[in-house]
């Protein structure tokens, strides 16, 4: 052994370079192993420190949930949201307000009675490093609560998750058979934000602006217009807003598009957003319009309301009928950016909020909500099929119902989904071939409904559709036969359930809201109903088939005429020629309405006076004209017109909107078509 060592030493002494190479290689191996160990330890350390754990703190008066990104404080036992601490803002909610006027649920029921749904008990549902879920409950008691609070039991849930800068909120509302009957007019969550910080509102890519302050709506700063919600800013704090109109209804959005809105605190470069990944729990289907954000600064998550529908959707909950429904979850999301004087952070915050919305949509239905009343993906089903349209007067072959709206809702008549609010609705749009797939549907029995752009009427499958967890129900090929009696002789408008294609006047320069500077939002400008009298100062609208253009010559709303301080009924005329008339034949006037409010349309044919040939009677409560909606509830009337009432040559149809006590008694037409006898 000694000899070998000597020989080795001798060898190395004769080759010092080889010795250095060996030492270097051993050093590399040692350093690599050491570095790998350090890296592994660092990764584990970073992983364990990727974000703080979710922590729950309880006192006699409140609970605090902190995940290192946000600190959420909730009052005990009422369940009112007292505060959200984020970045350098101790509370994004208005601390000058009372505890029940910062972040709260509320409900309006029966005769405009109001309840902020204060709860009585707090339960910890889940408490872990990854998530905290709390339940705030109130069981309605007839002895204690009758006439004081809405007859419904409430379970308000809050969830704070690790690494999520925000709080998820949802609620389960329940009625037992013994509860008294009631109307629910409104159900929502309200957030009153810090008034000295949040001044910039964002509703969409095009609707974003610095907003007036709450005090700008006080009498010394504004002039109240036709109704209290609309004011003209005469002396606003921000002089750039002087002369503009502010009205919360100008910021309404359809449910299918109402997924993201919120506010930005400019000097802090912080955003506050309400993210709604699904509208399955909202009332009235995908086209139901409702409020979003408005001056306050106020942000709303609307679940139930009679806006743009009226009492038709103010659901009647009967005594003796049990009911339960989960609303939400919605995510109250906060984000931040680096402040810069060019306001580029606003675009960054909006872009990030849209990115978060996309992530939440992909995660729906959530796997972390604990309530058994909110089923996860494995407890939901899928319904698919293909929708075709059959109309021999347009095409001999079946047509593909492309971009049609197809949905599942509670069983009812065709179109009843517009005024349905007790159950859940699941909607999608077809592809170019009319194919559809409605995913993540709750277990239950539904009707399948649809409407197709370019065709009048409502489709309803003539059988119930049962949905079971994990089951894919393929309905095959479905055929819609839209209402049709004969060939089209003439038509006015586009069957799209709105009045958007008709003439929408420029607003009075005195009454403008600059946030509505995009053509698609022109109909939301204030006072457009009054422009009818300006457009037709001496006579009512006359439309000549063949020469008139509905985008120029058909006013978007059939409103009363203003004469001084009074309003009077208006008579619109449709003039058309027929080369020949089958006196014994059956003609049909298809009259589709996009909205109606305390109105009545009387139809007369070639006789301006006397008893009407047809009347709608008094219809509608949607108030869509006053609330800047281009539609309310859809109605279709197929009016029989005997050939003996028509003439070869010149004919006139008189449309009289008879009710005129105020300027908002009006209808909006969707589409009118005269059909000849069947061939």
Image: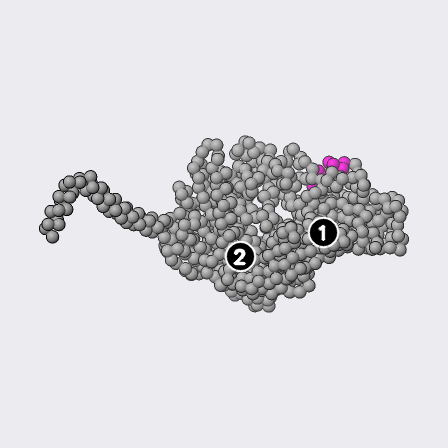
Q: Residue at x 60, y 42 (%)?
A: 250
Q: Secondary structure at mark 2?
A: strand
Horizontal placement of 6 versus 244: left or right? left
Quadrant including the C terminus:
bottom right
Q: Which of label 2 and label 1 is nearer to you?
A: 1
Q: Is residue 384 magenta?
A: no
Horizontal placement of 4 versus 555: left or right? left
Q: Residue at x 53, y 57 (%)?
A: 327
Q: Residue at x 86, y 46 (%)?
A: 578
Residue that lies at the very extreme toward the left in this rendered image? 2
Q: Secondary structure at mark 1?
A: loop
- Count residues near mark 1 (Cα–Cα under 10 Å), then give few for <14, some for 14-19, many for 20+: many
Q: Is residue 534 magenta?
A: yes
Query: Is residue 458 at least partly visible in the picture?
Result: no
Residue 594: give x, y in percent of width and height.
70, 49
- Count residues near mark 2 (Cα–Cα under 10 Å), then give few for <14, some for 14-19, many for 20+: many
* Viewer-closest of 22 and 29: 22
* Viewer-closest of 135 and 177: 135
* Viewer-closest of 374 and 9: 9
Main secondary structure found in the magenta portion: helix
Which comes sooner in the sequence, label 2 or label 1?
Answer: 2
Q: Residue at x 46, y 32 (%)?
A: 341
Query: Is residue 440 at least partly visible in the picture?
Result: yes
Q: Are marks 2 and 1 in contact (CB under 8 Å)?
A: no
**CA separation, marks 2 and 1?**
33 Å
In this figure, which residue is indicated by the disc labeled 2? 327
In this figure, which residue is indicated by the disc labeled 1? 455
Which residues make up the magenta segment? 529-537
Horizontal placement of 350 versus 58: left or right? right
Residue 377: give x, y in percent of width and height.
51, 60
Residue 615: give x, y in percent of width and height.
78, 53
* Viewer-closest of 305 and 365: 365
């Amino acid at each position: 052994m000694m000899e070998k060592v000597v020989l080795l030493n001798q060898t190395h002494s004769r080759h010092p370079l080889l010795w250095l190479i060996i030492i270097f290689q051993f050093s590399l191996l040692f350093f690599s192993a050491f570095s790998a160990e350090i890296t592994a330890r660092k990764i584990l350390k970073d992983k364990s420190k990727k974000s703080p754990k979710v922590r729950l703190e309880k006192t006699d008066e409140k609970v605090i949930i902190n995940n290192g990104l946000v600190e959420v404080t909730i009052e005990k036992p009422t369940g009112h949201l007292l505060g959200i601490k984020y970045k350098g803002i101790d509370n994004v909610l208005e601390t000058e307000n009372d505890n029940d006027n910062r972040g709260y649920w509320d409900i309006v029921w029966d005769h405009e009675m109001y309840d902020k749904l204060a709860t009585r008990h707090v339960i910890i549902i889940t408490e872990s490093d990854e998530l905290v879920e709390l339940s705030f409950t109130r069981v309605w008691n007839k002895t204690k609560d009758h006439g004081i609070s809405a007859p419904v039991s409430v379970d308000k849930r809050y969830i704070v998750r690790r690494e999520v800068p925000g709080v998820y909120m949802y609620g389960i509302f329940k009625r037992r058979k013994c509860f008294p009957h009631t109307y629910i007019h409104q159900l929502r969550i309200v957030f009153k934000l810090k008034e000295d910080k949040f001044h910039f509102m964002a509703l969409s890519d095009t609707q974003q602006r610095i907003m007036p302050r709450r005090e700008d709506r006080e009498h010394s700063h504004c002039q109240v217009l036709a109704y209290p919600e609309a004011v003209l800013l005469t002396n606003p704090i921000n002089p750039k807003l002087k002369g503009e109109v502010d009205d919360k209804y100008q910021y309404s959005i359809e449910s299918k598009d109402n997924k993201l809105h919120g506010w930005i605190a400019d000097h802090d470069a912080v955003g506050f957003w309400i993210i709604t990944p699904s509208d399955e729990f909202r009332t009235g289907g995908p086209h139901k319009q409702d409020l979003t954000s408005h001056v306050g600064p106020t942000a709303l998550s609307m679940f139930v309301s009679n806006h743009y529908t009226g009492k038709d959707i103010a659901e009647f909950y009967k005594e003796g009928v049990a009911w339960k429904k989960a609303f939400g979850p919605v995510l109250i999301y906060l984000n931040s950016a680096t402040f810069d004087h060019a306001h580029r952070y606003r675009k960054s915050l909006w872009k990030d909020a849209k990115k978060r919305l996309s992530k939440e949509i992909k995660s729906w239905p959530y796997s972390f909500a604990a309530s058994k009343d909110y089923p996860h993906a494995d407890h939901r089903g899928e319904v698919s099929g293909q929708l075709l349209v059959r109309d021999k007067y347009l095409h001999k072959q079946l047509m593909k119902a492309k971009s049609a709206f197809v949905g599942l809702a509670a069983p009812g008549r065709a179109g009843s989904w517009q005024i349905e609010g007790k159950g859940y609705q699941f909607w999608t749009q077809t592809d170019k071939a009319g194919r559809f797939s409605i995913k993540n549907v709750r277990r239950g029995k539904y009707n399948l409904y649809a409407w197709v752009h370019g065709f009048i009427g409502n489709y309803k499958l003539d059988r119930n559709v049962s949905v079971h967890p994990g089951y894919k129900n393929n309905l095959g090929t479905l055929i819609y036969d839209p209402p049709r009696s004969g060939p089209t002789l003439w038509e006015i408008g586009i069957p799209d359930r709105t009045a958007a294609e008709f003439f929408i006047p420029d607003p009075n320069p005195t009454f403008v809201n600059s946030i509505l500077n995009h053509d698609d939002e022109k109909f939301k400008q204030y006072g457009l109903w009054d422009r009818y009298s300006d457009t037709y100062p001496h006579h009512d609208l006359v439309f000549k088939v063949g020469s008139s253009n509905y985008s120029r010559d058909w006013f978007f709303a059939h409103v009363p005429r203003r004469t001084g301080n009074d309003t009077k009924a208006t008579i619109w005329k449709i003039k058309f020629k027929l080369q020949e008339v089958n006196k014994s034949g059956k003609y049909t006037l298809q009259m589709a309405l996009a909205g109606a409010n305390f109105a009545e349309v009387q139809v007369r044919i070639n006789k301006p006076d006397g008893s009407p040939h047809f009347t709608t009677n008094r219809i509608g409560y949607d108030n869509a004209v006053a609330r800047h909606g281009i539609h309310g509830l859809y109605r279709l009337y197929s009016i029989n017109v005997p050939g003996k009432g028509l003439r070869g040559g010149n004919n006139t149809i008189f449309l009289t909107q008879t009710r005129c006590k105020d300027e908002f008694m009006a209808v909006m037409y969707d589409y009118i078509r005269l059909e000849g006898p069947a061939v």
